Image (cartoon, rainbow, N blue to C red):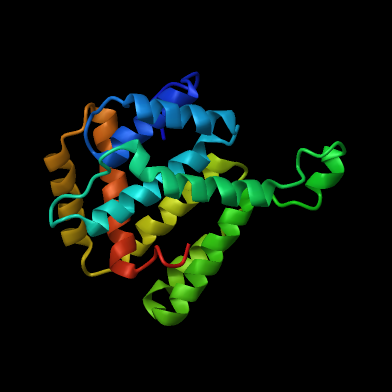
Amino acid sequence: MSLLPDNATFHEQVEACFVAYRGRGVSLSAVDVELVDGWAAREVPFEVIARGIRKAAEAALVDAPAGEGALRSLKSARRAVESEITKYLKVSAGRTATDSAAAATDVEPFHLARHRRLVKALATLAREQPALEPVAQAIAALPFPADFQQANRHEDLALALVLRRTNERTSILREARRLVENASPASAAARLESLRFHRAALVRQRWSISAFW
């Protein structure tokens, strides 16, 4: 997420993420704030939380009536966020051991594990849908991401390349714009982030990508 300055607090980052994925400006409720407090106490990277919120928002988009689709509250994203936290902690197990340097040699960083899953998922999709073979090859040829932000960029690039391979590109872009216009986010930055999210979510739906990673 790029809606806030680098010194934004964890709570501010989560709120900005929620606004962008939900599609309209809204203040976090007391229950939501308490939920964010709990996530902050677990000391996982913000990107892990953002990924969970995004997945919940995508699920809401699929289940909602035509033309709608928004998380009603941050609480409704709790299950997806907790799932991402569990995955992160499982991959990161042992990295806080006393001999952290030695432990790190046995545990792959989460953003690298995530990139490997992306490459594997695209290879699987390419076998089922040959039109995606160039996308799978392009992403497999990328250098391994150095951090969460770069891993996010790799995934965004993958979805953008997938979009180029479909004859429904124009209709997907039009639908994404319509959803954002209906939602009316709170700021220009949130609007842009919301457009990117809805576009990516529609691509995942069209190509059944969510089932793979």
Q: Residue at x 18, y 42 (%)?
A: 180
Q: Quadrant of the N terminus?
A: top left
- Image coordinates of residue 193 in percent, x first then y, are 31, 38
Against 159, residue 8 (above or below) is above
Judge left or right: residue 209 versus residue 185: right
Judge left or right: residue 197 versus residue 5: left
Q: Residue at x 31, y 26 (%)?
A: 29
Say if residue 156 shows up in the picture.
yes
Q: Residue at x 30, y 36 (%)?
A: 20
Q: Residue at x 60, y 60 (%)?
A: 116
Say if residue 111 shows up in the picture.
no
Against 114, residue 48 (above or below) is above
Q: Nearer the viewer, residue 164 or 32?
A: 32
Against 6, residue 55 (above or below) is below
- Image coordinates of residue 128 in percent, x first then y, are 42, 81
* Total count of labels: 0
Against 185, residue 157 (above or below) is below
- Image coordinates of residue 58 in percent, x first then y, are 32, 53
Q: Nearer the viewer, residue 203 or 67?
A: 67
Quarter of image, res 201: bottom left
Q: Tell which residue pokes out farthest to the top in this image.
A: 7
Q: Nearer the viewer, residue 92 or 189?
A: 92
- Image coordinates of residue 25 in percent, x first then y, are 23, 29
